[in-house]
Structures are given as C-alpha cells and as structure tokens.
Image (cartoon, helix red, strand yellow):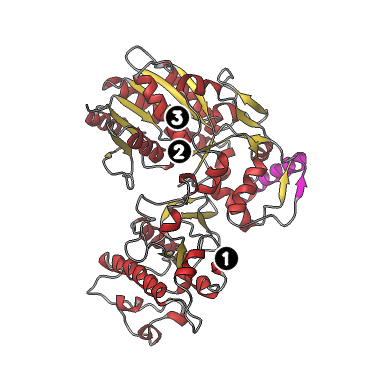
Amino acid sequence: MPGPRVLVTGGSGFLGSAIVKACREQHPEWDVTVLDVKPPESQDGVGFVKADITTVEEVSRAVESVRPAVLIHAAGVVPSGEQRYSQSGHDRDEVFAINVQGTDNMLAAARRYGVVAFIYTSSCTVVTDDVDHDYPNMDEELSTQKASLTYGQSKATAEAHILAANSADMNTCVIRPSMVFGPGDTQVVPSIYACIAKGETPFVVGSGDNLYDFTFVTNAADAHVLAVENLLGPKTAAGEAFFISNQEPVPFRDFCLAVWAEFGHVPPYQVHIPATVAWFAGYLAEWATRLTGSSATLSRGSVKDACGTRYARGQKAKRVLGYSPRIGLVDATKKSYAAVKSVSLIRLSKKLKDNLDSEINILRSLQHPHIVALFDCTESPTHIHLVMQYCQLSDLSQFMKKRNTLGAYPETADIFKKYPNAPAGGLNEVVVRHFLKQTASAMEYLRARNLIHRDVKPQNLLLNPSPLYMKKLKPEEMPLAASENSLVPAVGVESLPMIKLADFGFARVLPTTSLAETLCGSPLYMAPEILRYERYDAKADL
C-alpha cells in the first residue's frame, strides 16, 4: 500500500537531508520529495522540486506540483559569526524574510493544496536567545516572547504562526532542537575546531561549568519522523511544541574539550577569564567594529551566550512522541569530527581567491570512493571553512615513514601480519599494488570529467582504515561518510587502507584536445615536461 507524499523543505541542507534519510529508512513506503534551491545529494528514490521559499509564486507552484499530505518545513537560515549577535536592521530583515515570511508562504500553500500534517523545525533559541537569563531544565510552558537576538525572535514568530494554524483540516506541531551537530555540520563543530588554529583553546570564559544541551543530527531527524507518525495517527502532538535534545546536558567547555580531543588536541594550559572582563572586552570589540568596519567574533552577546546555562527537560517529547535519543553524546561526538580547512580571506589576493573558488567548485562536483569528499563550505566575513572527510590514518607519506611501528595500532595491526614489509625495508608489494590501483581509479574518474589534478604526491594521498576494519565497528563508531558507498573501495584489497586523493588547489578543467602551460605543483613530484616549461596534458598526473 503506497504511503503518504511527504515534502521536506530545506531537504538538501544539513538537518533537512538527515530528515529525508530518516524518512526513507524508517518508512520506505513514503513518497518523499525535497523542496530546495539546490538538489539533494545521494538521496536515491527522492524527488526534487526547486523553489525559493521567500517567493510566493515559486512556493505555490512547487507545492501544487507535489500535492503532499505531509509537509516538514526545515528550511531556514541560522546567522553565523558576528551576525548571530548583530542588532543591525539589515541583518534582521534578511533573517525574518526567510524564517518568517518564508514560513508564512509555506503555510499558505499548505492550506491551499490540502496538506493534513505540517511539522515545523523551530529551535530552542525561541527561549534561550534571551541571553540575559539562564534557562536550566526548560519546559514548553516558558514564554517565547523574551528573545533578544534576531534568530530566536524569528523562530518564535514563525512557530507562533504554525501553532495558530492548527485545525481539524491541518494538524501542526513544532520541533525545537537544541544545538544540532553531526555529519555535514558547518557551524558547531567547525567553530569549535577553528579555536585550535586561533590558539583560543586554553581560555575559559566564566566558570566553565555552565550546562548546555546538544542534539546529534540523526536524533533530531528521528523526532521529525515521530512527529509525522503522530499527526497521521493519534494526533496528540497537534498544536504542540517539543524541545528535542540528546538529554545529556554537559558543561559547554567539556563538549569543546571532547571535540578537540577527537582532533588530537589538548589545551596545553588553562586561563580563566572572568565573565565581567570578557563582557567588557566584547563591548570594546563592538565599538572597534563600528569605528573600523572590520569584523569581530567577540561581542557582549557572544560572551553572555558562552557563559549561560541552557538545557531542556525533554519529558514532553518522550511522553507524547515517544522520543528517545538513539545515539548518545559520546558516540555522537566521535561520529562528528571532520577535517576543516579554514582559509583567511584577509590574506587572499584575487587570484588566490579565484583558485580557492575553483577548488571548491571542483570538489563539489566529485563523488568517488577514492577522492576526499567535501561535505560543505561556509563563508564568514573573515574566513572560508571547507568541511571535508577526515582521514584518520593521515597520508601515504606518513604511512611509509611509520611502516615499522604501525603494527602496534588496532586500525593497522592485521595489515602487517598478513603483508609484512619487504626485506629491503619498503612496503609489501601487495600493499603497493593496492595503493596504485586505488590512485589510478581516482585519476581515471577525474580524466573522464576532463579534470587534471597537477599535484599528485604521497602527502595528498590520504588514508582511511580498511573496509574490513570498519565492519568491526559499531554504527555509532563509523566515521563520517559522504555517501553510502564512499567507504566502499572501487578496487583493491578489502583488508588494506583506502586511498583518498586530496588537495585540489591546482586542479583545473582540461579537455582532451587542450594543453596546459601553467608551472604549478610540488617540484619533487612534477612531470619533466612541466619543469621544462613545456605545454602538457593530463599525462602529467602520471
């Protein structure tokens, strides 16, 4: 029996794509379609309709074409960096246009075309963006009219419209996740990771023991599926809002330490900065921003937020929806680390910025098990952050250098028992052939797309543990994957590590009938024709 048609707005985004995946996995009979400005990645069997939620006509046409019974409205914008705490009228207008007017457009179309269940993705910030007060053990009875920050105000306004629209013809409910993180996260984990490069990890603002709520992305997605099931069934969630979290409040500092530990970083020392001192520094930073026009990450709002206590009780979601987080916070943290390449825009010339844009566009177009995946890319006024697949065995250069000691690690112990190093000291021939096959597979894929890498070297060949080792891990221990087959090798031996070709900074499109002439790459690994300043083709990668 066919299931209901389900339309997920923002289904190509971070949380939206997780909701789509949860719908497909838990209810394969549901007919799921994504409404977004860009198509979803790796969502087989999922429909797509392009629309901008701020445009009434586009929304109306899209909803009319799908005629869903269920609408999950997850599209929205979360201000990042200094915009998160900005009181600028321009910033407010941009956020309200998407989060409020966009929601109103979806609501109107849902009424017009017969949607019977409408689930809205709100946020705990409808309460916690009142940064002047602590909110321990929150419940749904708290007022949503006290938020002082634009994002919380926009979500509170939109969810009030959703709940007011609940009726016998269309049941509505609201999901309020706390801080969401996980695979594809471009804000929470990348921001915490960026503190390492900035040298900020030793500094503790305030006491450091203020409790915070977090939600792993698949747990947040589960809550949406439960809401759909309820509104199509007993309807006890109709007209209600629900706080969703991992139900494990922890000191914000401890969460940061756990994330840094996954990247192998431990702060060398700790310096406690009193909240009042930090608040005054934020005040000065705000004035400096106004006077110079530069951007700042510190503000009075960010200090208050960092020192605040914010966590929810979660009993209502458990009682009404049957919600319980499937993945605990410890396992969720292990699943959420990725490689984050942060590039300062201040130091980039126009040519280097163009090269970076080209690298991002190329990486976005690639999906191959032996090419490192780009999960997402986010830009702040001062930096561009590339969130990529993390390869925990480092690169081939390090693998070769440490080959005599890798037998002591669980990820590589079995390799050297089965394939001992060559008597002369090099890698076993079977291992070498395996790495060559996987590298050739990646290069063949690039060539089929008229791409040339121009910097293939051991340092740019990253390594993941073998698929055989991965099979021994629990689901919650698996590393982030770009798609279902990104951890399945195209060629090679299943018991050996997987090669991932990385660093596309010199890559470019080069049709088979064309030649390149730019001198670029790493001198020790350049093809002779490049060093001779001759024109060259894709064979230079060999």
Q: CA distance from mark 1 to mark 2?
A: 34 Å
Q: CA distance from mark 3 to mark 2?
A: 9 Å
Q: Quadrant of the C terminus?
A: bottom left
Q: Nearer the viewer, residue 372 or 234?
A: 234
Label 1: state its secondary structure.
helix
Q: CA distance from mark 3 to mark 1?
A: 42 Å
Q: Main secondary structure of the magenta part?
A: helix
135 horizontally vs 451: left or right? right
370 horizontally vs 282: left or right? left
Q: Which residue is found at the position 63% from the left and 51% from the top?
A: 292
**Any mark on residue 408, and which?**
1
Which amino acid is tagged 3? Ala
**Any mark on residue 319, and which?**
none
- Look at the image and say whether residue 287 sits in the magenta stretch: yes
Q: Which residue is mark 2?
A: 218
Which amino acid is tagged 2? Thr
